[in-house]
Amino acid sequence: MSYQIVFFDIDGTLLNTDHIIPPTTIEAIHQLKRNGMHVAIATGRSPYHLADIARQLEIDTFVSFNGSYNVHQGQVIHHTPLDMQTLNNLESIAGENNHPMVFLSAESCYANTEDHPHVLESFDFLQLPSPAVRQQYWKEKPIYQAFLYCNESEERPYIENYREVSYVRWHPQVLDVLPPNGSKARGIEALLHHLGLRPEEAIAFGDGLNDKEMLSFVGMGVAMGNAHDELKPYADMLTRHVDDDGISFGLKKLGLI
């Protein structure tokens, strides 16, 4: 198979356990581009939370918000905001359960509760500044992703009663709330269509539960050595741990660099 494009997750894939991009990864991606390969990011992060990494790697194409907002060379080619009434309903029931939420637009993100420890913990985990408070931010801007703060034992009523959205857990205290059938795979599908490429011509590297659909969809799904155990069955290939030059090793194993 002649591969044409490679998608990289960020946290745990491009970023190591010290939350930096290993030098071997930087060089591998630069070599990949010199070899004529398209390179893109596929992440649950927002455009503004991936910007520094994209600049460092000189990447201008990305799937963000787990597929809800997708950009090629600075042009938005596909976006799917969440329904306002659904957000209103979710925020109401979450408030009754004392579960805070964070709402993310293409420009910024705001929490509906000030300095909640779970919000602070999750943004610290991502090494990102905690969001300011702005009530009903979903009324002001299209929202492409929301964070719903509840633990796994508390998530069932949301998933069973609000099926007009998709949910992905990425942290013990946080559920991503996404548009219906939202996933990185849907964003990749839109980007491939824009580029005139087929799924079989794409490769994706990932490590998290939100990478299941992506690794299944592309022609070559690569799980990092540090990947969640539930992700590994969805991969076609397993590379080394992110701290052990996993990106460089995987690209070399595939004969791309």
Image (cartoon, rainbow, N blue to C red):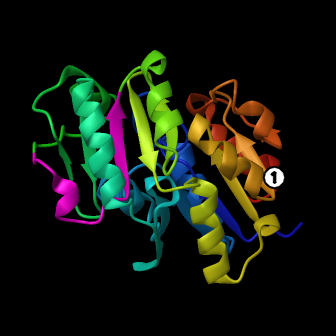
- Pinpoint residue 12: horizontal percent, then vertical percent: 52, 35
Q: Quadrant of the N terminus?
A: bottom right
Q: Which residues are magenta?
A: 134-149
Instruction: Answer with the quarter of the image where residue 189 lies.
Output: bottom right
65 magenta-colored: no
Q: Residue at x 81, y 41 (%)?
A: 237
Q: Quadrant of residue 229?
A: top right
Pinpoint residue 110: horizontal percent, then vertical percent. Answer: 18, 47
Side (left or right) of 132 relative to 257? left
Point out the image quarter for the C terminus: bottom right
The amino acid sitting under disc 1 is: Leu
The front one of 252 and 235 is 235
Q: Residue at x 74, y 32 (%)?
A: 232
* x, y percent for residue 18: 40, 29
The answer to whether residue 190 is above or below residue 239 is below
Q: Secondary structure at mark 1?
A: loop
**Residue under circle 1?**
254
Q: In the displayed structure, would residue 153 be above or below residue 143?
A: above
110 or 42: nearer the viewer: 110
Work out which residue is located at the far right of the displayed protein and give it: 1
